[in-house]
Image (cartoon, rainbow, N blue to C red):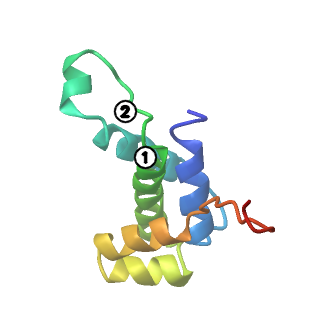
Amino acid sequence: NNVYIFPGLALGAKLCKAPIITDDMFMAASEALVEVISQERLAAGQVFPDLNNPRDIGAAVALGVIKSAAAEGLASGPAFDALSEGESVLLDHIKNSMYNPEYVHLYPQL
Protein backbone atom coordinates (compact mmCIF):
# COMPACT_ATOMS: atom_id res chain seq x y z
CA ASN A 1 0.00 0.00 0.00
CA ASN A 2 2.68 2.51 0.92
CA VAL A 3 4.50 2.07 -2.37
CA TYR A 4 1.57 1.41 -4.68
CA ILE A 5 -1.44 3.35 -3.42
CA PHE A 6 -0.47 6.28 -1.25
CA PRO A 7 1.76 8.27 -3.64
CA GLY A 8 -0.98 8.34 -6.30
CA LEU A 9 -3.73 8.83 -3.72
CA ALA A 10 -2.01 11.87 -2.25
CA LEU A 11 -1.12 13.28 -5.66
CA GLY A 12 -4.67 12.89 -6.96
CA ALA A 13 -6.21 14.43 -3.83
CA LYS A 14 -3.79 17.36 -3.95
CA LEU A 15 -4.23 18.05 -7.66
CA CYS A 16 -8.03 18.07 -7.50
CA LYS A 17 -8.03 20.04 -4.24
CA ALA A 18 -10.19 17.44 -2.50
CA PRO A 19 -11.01 18.66 1.02
CA ILE A 20 -11.18 15.06 2.28
CA ILE A 21 -10.19 11.59 1.12
CA THR A 22 -13.23 9.35 1.07
CA ASP A 23 -13.66 5.59 1.11
CA ASP A 24 -14.72 5.80 -2.54
CA MET A 25 -11.45 7.53 -3.39
CA PHE A 26 -9.51 4.72 -1.67
CA MET A 27 -11.54 2.17 -3.61
CA ALA A 28 -10.89 4.02 -6.88
CA ALA A 29 -7.17 4.03 -6.09
CA SER A 30 -7.25 0.26 -5.50
CA GLU A 31 -9.22 -0.36 -8.68
CA ALA A 32 -6.80 1.79 -10.68
CA LEU A 33 -3.91 -0.24 -9.29
CA VAL A 34 -5.51 -3.46 -10.50
CA GLU A 35 -5.80 -2.01 -14.01
CA VAL A 36 -2.02 -1.54 -14.33
CA ILE A 37 -1.19 -5.17 -13.50
CA SER A 38 -0.12 -6.92 -16.70
CA GLN A 39 -1.82 -10.11 -17.80
CA GLU A 40 1.57 -11.87 -17.68
CA ARG A 41 1.98 -11.03 -13.99
CA LEU A 42 -1.57 -12.13 -13.23
CA ALA A 43 -1.00 -15.42 -15.09
CA ALA A 44 2.13 -15.95 -12.98
CA GLY A 45 0.07 -15.47 -9.80
CA GLN A 46 1.48 -12.03 -9.01
CA VAL A 47 -1.07 -9.61 -7.63
CA PHE A 48 0.89 -6.34 -7.78
CA PRO A 49 2.23 -4.46 -10.80
CA ASP A 50 5.92 -4.33 -11.59
CA LEU A 51 7.63 -1.49 -9.74
CA ASN A 52 10.02 -0.67 -12.56
CA ASN A 53 7.95 2.40 -13.41
CA PRO A 54 6.38 3.76 -10.22
CA ARG A 55 5.54 7.10 -11.83
CA ASP A 56 3.12 5.42 -14.26
CA ILE A 57 1.51 3.53 -11.38
CA GLY A 58 1.16 6.75 -9.37
CA ALA A 59 -0.33 8.58 -12.34
CA ALA A 60 -2.89 5.83 -12.94
CA VAL A 61 -3.87 5.82 -9.27
CA ALA A 62 -4.10 9.63 -9.20
CA LEU A 63 -6.34 9.52 -12.27
CA GLY A 64 -8.72 7.14 -10.52
CA VAL A 65 -8.73 9.27 -7.38
CA ILE A 66 -9.49 12.48 -9.28
CA LYS A 67 -12.31 10.83 -11.21
CA SER A 68 -13.79 9.55 -7.95
CA ALA A 69 -13.47 12.94 -6.27
CA ALA A 70 -15.18 14.58 -9.26
CA ALA A 71 -18.03 12.06 -9.12
CA GLU A 72 -18.48 12.91 -5.43
CA GLY A 73 -18.45 16.66 -6.10
CA LEU A 74 -15.15 17.10 -4.24
CA ALA A 75 -12.87 18.11 -7.12
CA SER A 76 -11.97 21.57 -8.36
CA GLY A 77 -9.16 23.49 -9.99
CA PRO A 78 -7.02 22.70 -13.03
CA ALA A 79 -7.23 18.91 -12.57
CA PHE A 80 -11.01 19.07 -12.58
CA ASP A 81 -10.90 21.27 -15.67
CA ALA A 82 -8.51 18.81 -17.37
CA LEU A 83 -10.90 15.93 -16.61
CA SER A 84 -13.68 17.78 -18.44
CA GLU A 85 -11.43 17.71 -21.53
CA GLY A 86 -10.91 13.94 -21.30
CA GLU A 87 -8.94 11.33 -19.41
CA SER A 88 -5.88 11.66 -21.66
CA VAL A 89 -5.72 15.41 -20.98
CA LEU A 90 -6.04 14.74 -17.25
CA LEU A 91 -3.33 12.07 -17.39
CA ASP A 92 -1.01 14.54 -19.12
CA HIS A 93 -1.83 17.12 -16.44
CA ILE A 94 -1.03 14.60 -13.70
CA LYS A 95 2.30 13.61 -15.26
CA ASN A 96 3.26 17.24 -15.83
CA SER A 97 2.46 18.01 -12.19
CA MET A 98 4.73 15.31 -10.78
CA TYR A 99 7.94 16.32 -9.12
CA ASN A 100 10.91 15.43 -11.28
CA PRO A 101 14.17 15.44 -9.32
CA GLU A 102 17.02 16.78 -11.39
CA TYR A 103 20.48 17.62 -10.13
CA VAL A 104 21.60 21.07 -11.18
CA HIS A 105 25.34 21.56 -11.28
CA LEU A 106 26.30 24.71 -9.44
CA TYR A 107 29.85 24.71 -10.74
CA PRO A 108 31.21 23.89 -14.17
CA GLN A 109 32.09 20.25 -14.57
CA LEU A 110 35.82 19.57 -14.67
Question: Would residue 8 be found to the left or right of residue 42 on screen?
Answer: right
- Tell me which residue sits at (61%, 62%) in the image: 99
Labels 1 and 2: the sequence-earlier one:
2
Of the pair 92 and 75, the residue shown nearer to us: 92
SS state under label 1: helix
In the image, residue 33 sits, relative to residue 63, either above or below, namely above
Q: Position of residue 83 (x, y in %)?
A: 38, 76
Say what amino acid the circle numbered 2 marks: Pro
Q: Which residue is mark 1?
A: 57
Q: In which quarter of the view is residue 53 placed?
A: top left
Given the current orientation, which residue lies at the most extreme top position?
45
Of the pair 13 and 55, the residue shown nearer to us: 55
Whether label 1 touches label 2, CB < 8 Å: yes
Q: Position of residue 86 (x, y in %)?
A: 29, 76
Q: Which residue is mark 2?
A: 49
Q: In which quarter of the view is residue 6 placed?
A: top right
Q: Position of residue 71 (x, y in %)?
A: 41, 67
In the image, residue 101 sits, relative to residue 82, either above or below, namely above
Task: State how far apart marks 1 and 2 are (Cα).
Answer: 8 Å
Say what amino acid the circle numbered 1 marks: Ile
SS state under label 2: loop
| Residue 4, visible in the rendered structure | yes
- Tell me which residue sits at (80%, 68%) in the image: 106
Given the current orientation, which residue lies at the most extreme front position?
110
- Tell me which residue sits at (41%, 51%) in the image: 56
Image quarter in which the C terminus is found: bottom right
| Residue 22, visible in the rendered structure | no
- Tell me which residue sits at (39%, 41%) in the image: 33
